[in-house]
Image (cartoon, rainbow, N blue to C red):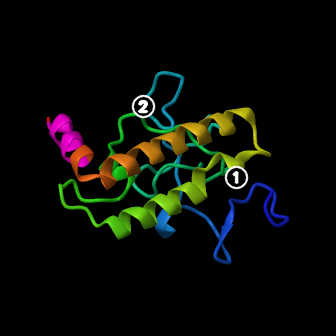
């Protein structure tokens, strides 16, 4: 789609995005067939959940559904602590929005558009929550298990 590369991810700073922070992307969508192996909703391929952030399928590059159990700290690549490096947080926020913002999915399937909106909303919520000390503290307190 972008720059003549069909199925490619957006280009940022002269580089084709292949994942977050230079890691390989992977599938994180749970199989609809009832087993525990992760499968891409689009191609049915399975990915390595250990590597990458799970935003895109490594085989077909389709955006995968967000993981509703993922906490804000892991999403924003921050230590689970009251002290947060806000410059790093802002950088991560911008990086994630360049990957999942709905504007980059206008020519994709409706499923990917929907996943993009959900990812973008989760990223916005995580950023706003972790940026403000009061909401960050409340989030930490409420997420303790």
Asked if 67 appears above or below 78 in the picture, the reply is above
Look at mark 1 in the image and give the residue it sits on. 104
Residue at 33 percent of width and 55 percent of height: 131
Is residue 40 in view?
Answer: no
Q: Where does the image place residue 119, in percent across and percent down from the top left?
A: 52, 42
Q: Nearer the viewer, residue 31 or 7?
A: 7
* Residue 141 belongs to magenta span: yes
Residue 59 visible in image: yes
Reply above or below: 37 against 11.
Answer: above
Residue 81: name its quadrant: bottom left
Q: Are there few (<14), some (14-19), or many (20+) residues within 10 Å of tag 1? A: some
Rendered residue at 28%/67% (across/down): 85
- Real-space Cα distance between discs 1 and 2? 30 Å
Residue holding disc 2 = 36
Q: Quarter of the image for the C terminus: give it.
A: top left
Instruction: Point out the frontmost of discs 1 and 2.
Output: 1
> Observer-nearest residue: 36 or 127?
127
Q: Residue at x 66, y 46 (%)?
A: 102
Q: Magenta stretch: give its range.
A: 136-144
Number of disc labels: 2
Q: Quadrant of the N terminus?
A: bottom right
Say what secondary structure mark 1 lies in.
Answer: helix
> Looking at the rendering, which quadrant does residue 13 occupy?
bottom right
Q: Residue furthest top?
A: 34
Q: Position of residue 53 (x, y in %)?
A: 45, 54
- Residue 42 circle label: none
- Front residue of 32 and 93: 93
């Amino acid at each position: 789609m972008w720059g003549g590369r069909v199925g490619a991810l957006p280009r940022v700073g002269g580089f084709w995005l292949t994942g977050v922070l230079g890691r390989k992307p992977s599938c994180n969508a749970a199989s609809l067939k009832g087993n525990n192996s992760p499968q891409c909703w689009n191609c049915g391929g399975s990915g390595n959940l250990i590597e990458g952030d799970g935003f895109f399928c490594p085989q077909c590059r389709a955006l995968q559904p967000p993981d509703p159990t993922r906490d804000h700290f892991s999403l924003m690549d921050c230590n689970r602590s009251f002290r947060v490096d806000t410059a790093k947080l802002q950088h991560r926020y911008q990086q994630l929005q360049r990957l999942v913002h709905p504007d980059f999915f206008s020519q994709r399937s409706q499923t990917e558009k929907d996943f993009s909106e959900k990812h973008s909303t989760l990223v916005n919520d995580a950023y706003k929550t972790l940026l403000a000390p009061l909401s960050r503290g409340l989030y930490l307190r409420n997420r303790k298990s």
